[in-house]
Image: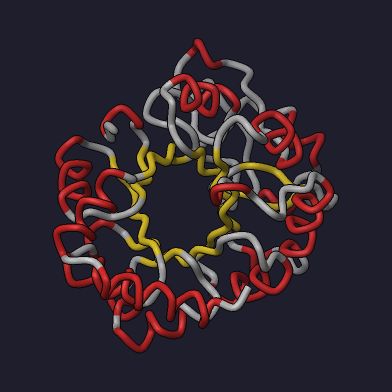
Amino acid sequence: MNKKVLAGIGISFALLLSPLQQASAAKNDVDNVAHRGASGYAPENTVAAFEKAFEMKSDYIEIDVQQSKDGELVVIHDVTVDRTTNGTGAVKDLTLEELQSLDAGSWKGTEFAGEPIPTFEEILDRYRGKIGILIELKSPELYPGIEAKIAGELKERNMDKPNNEKIIVQSFNFDSMKKMDELLPNVPIGVLTGSKADTTEEKLQQFATYADYFNPHYGLVTNELVTNVHNNGMKISSWTVRNQQTADFLLSMNIDAIITDYPDFVQK
């Protein structure tokens, strides 16, 4: 995918629209992304949370992908299992069997007791075609070659040419996302950041050469940033909404997607 060409098209298109038209288009089309599933209501990164997000009619589920000791792709956020399971240790030091023997639900409530850590394959097979999937590579620097594995799983299912951008890959690791753009030229790529240093015009132009989405923490979002991102041919998604006030703020900024623990805070 030639992101430079797309960026130029995006700039030209943006210039054709009045500010009011741009604002209206973005606000009406805002995507509701369930962060680690509907994680405000069910244990994050479990089928229970993803099912809740589907039930709440989210546009996407966001999942975090890491790798087990024996090379299997698993869906979990932290690099250790300590916070969200009844186990201890690093994800990369535990086999898939060991990881899936853990209880990843009880910490959220007794009704979720026994929820396992899902595999990446399981989530792809369960939700492909049903809901968009925003795939975050979590600490890919810990897992050399994980980009190729993820690309392979998507290609095996013909999900490397998604309709309506229903598959997106993102990470805080920019080098990893450059690799993903090479491996999956037809899949939208997102860069995550919580740093103001990444919001300069120079950095946005760099991101636009390989990324389709610029995804900052909501504390960085301003009208100027939204305009600059759009003018560089990218969309902007922001994270993480955990109250109605933040959701309303982001809606007023006319961004393209809101990543939230509570999908009901982001109404169409």
Quadrant for the C terminus, please.
top left
**Residue at the image point whose x is 31% and y is 75% from the top:** 231
Say which of 19 and 213 sits in front.
19
The image position of residue 83, as x and y in percent, is 50, 39
Say which of 69 and 192 sits in front.
192
Q: Toward which corner of the image does residue 182 lie, by quadrant?
A: bottom right
In the picture as drawn, the residue positioned furthest to the front comes out as: 16
**Residue at the image point whose x is 77% and y is 36% from the top:** 98
Vertical side of 177 occupied by 137: above or below:
above
Instruction: Give left or right: position of 199 versus 8.
Output: left
Vertical side of 110 occupied by 216: above or below:
below
The image position of residue 135, as x and y in percent, is 58, 50
Say which of 36 and 109 sits in front.
36
Quadrant for the N terminus, please.
bottom right
How many discs mark residues in the rendered view?
0
In the picture as drawn, the residue positioned furthest to the top comes out as: 111
The image position of residue 13, as x and y in percent, is 34, 71
**Residue at the image point whose x is 58% and y is 57% from the top:** 169
Vertical side of 239 occupied by 177: above or below:
below
Instruction: Give left or right: position of 102 versus 131.
Output: right
Colour treatment of the image: secondary structure
**Residue at the image point whose x is 70% and y is 38% from the top:** 124
The image position of residue 202, as x and y in percent, is 35, 89
Q: Toward which corner of the image does residue 144 lie, by quadrant?
A: bottom right
Instruction: Give left or right: position of 141 versus 71.
Output: left
Vertical side of 132 occupied by 222: above or below:
below
